[in-house]
């Protein structure tokens, strides 16, 4: 079964509480999302393997360590996942970026895919799917399905807020996918929005409501 990690660092929790408030405007919302994404990226990359490299300092030659092996790709789920890209790239600037466009049909709550563009070597990379909200899990499961079709085998999810229902849905369909979140909320409401949540992440990032 996959691992679920909650990054309950005081700074992340504090910033998320500001984001949740309905009077927080798009500018602050975007900035806070970017800052939290940077902090989460720092934690997610903690386990990257290191290898020995020979380098020359101004004083002498020495053997030191650098990140080795598999490289990272981040895959934001459009639209709201875009708000997490800049923060992640601040910590990990060499990551490549794929995009998957999925929206939830307002009636059925089922995911509808409309865009998919990945780096050529995506199957050889560790893939981090970015989306602030894991609600029913439909959008994330759809993104993972498509990435697995391309041969990706090392995939994880990075979400800001998750509902228990969404975590369960991902674990049932993709038990190999680790999930990293800033908070696990109570439940979904009758419109499949996360409670207490923060509302519609895409609308709050882009000011479309
Ligand atoms: C939101 C959110 C997730 C999805 C989560 O996107 O950013 O992608 O809903 O819900 P789920 O887990 O039930 O699938 P939305 O459909 O609102 O599209 P948008 O980002 O373009 O606004
Ligand atoms: N999508 C959002 O943006 N927010 C929710 O609470 C659920 C789905």
Image (spheres, rainbow, N blue to C red):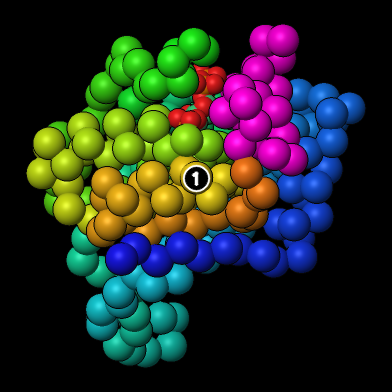
Residue 56 coordinates in the image, percent (x, y)? 33, 80
Is residue 196 covered in magenta?
yes
**Which residue corresponds to the image point at 38% horizontal and 73% vertical from the top-left?**
47
> Could you tell me residue 11's position as x and y percent?
76, 60
For residue 48, above or below residue 55: above
* Residue 159, placed above or below residue 28: below
Q: Nearer the viewer, residue 124 or 140?
A: 140
Residue 38 seen: no
Residue occupying the point 75% across, 57% down: 13
On whether ligand 1 comes within 8 Å of the CB at mark 1, the answer is no
Residue 68 spot, x, y in % from top left? 25, 69
The total number of labels drawn is: 1
Which quadrant does the C terminus fall into? top right
Residue depicted at 43% across the width and 88% down the height:
59
Residue 118's place in the image compared with 50, above or below, is above
Question: Quadrant where the N terminus lies?
Answer: bottom left
Would residue 103 appear left or right of 32 to someone viewing this image?
left
Residue 186 appears in the figure? yes
- SS under mark 1: helix
Determine whether, in the image, residue 19 is placed left or right of residue 74.
Answer: right
Residue 24: in magenta span: no
2 or 147, which is in the foreground? 2
Outermost residue on the right side: it is: 23
Q: Judge from the rendering whether residue 18 lies leftward or rightward of residue 110; answer left or right.
A: right
Taking depth in this image into account, of 155 and 53 the one nearest to the observer is 155
Q: Quadrant of residue 86?
A: top right
| Residue at screen point 44% across, 15% down | 108
Label 1 sits on residue: 165
Q: Which residues are magenta?
A: 188-209
Which residue is nearer to you in this view: 31 or 138? 138
On screen, residue 47 above or below 93: below
Q: Position of residue 124 (x, y in %)?
A: 15, 51
């Amino acid at each position: 079964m996959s691992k679920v990690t909650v990054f309950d660092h005081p700074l992340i929790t504090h910033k998320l509480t500001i984001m949740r408030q309905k009077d927080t405007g798009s500018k602050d919302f975007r900035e806070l999302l970017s800052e939290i994404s940077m902090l989460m990226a720092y934690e997610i990359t903690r386990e990257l393997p290191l290898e020995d490299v020979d380098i020359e300092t101004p004083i002498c030659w020495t053997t030191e360590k650098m990140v080795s092996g598999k490289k990272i790709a981040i895959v934001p789920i459009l639209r709201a996942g875009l708000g997490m890209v800049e923060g992640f790239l601040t910590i990990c600037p060499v990551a490549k970026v794929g995009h998957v466009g999925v929206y939830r049909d307002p009636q059925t709550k089922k995911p509808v895919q409309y865009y998919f563009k990945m780096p050529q070597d995506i199957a050889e990379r560790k893939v981090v799917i970015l989306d602030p909200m894991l609600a029913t899990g439909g959008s994330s499961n759809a993104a993972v399905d498509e990435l697995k079709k391309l041969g990706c085998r090392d995939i994880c999810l990075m979400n800001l807020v998750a509902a228990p229902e969404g975590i369960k849905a991902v674990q049932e369909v993709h038990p190999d996918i680790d999930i990293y979140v800033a908070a696990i909320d109570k439940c979904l409401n009758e419109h499949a929005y996360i409670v207490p949540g923060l509302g519609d992440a895409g609308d709050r990032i882009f000011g479309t409501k």
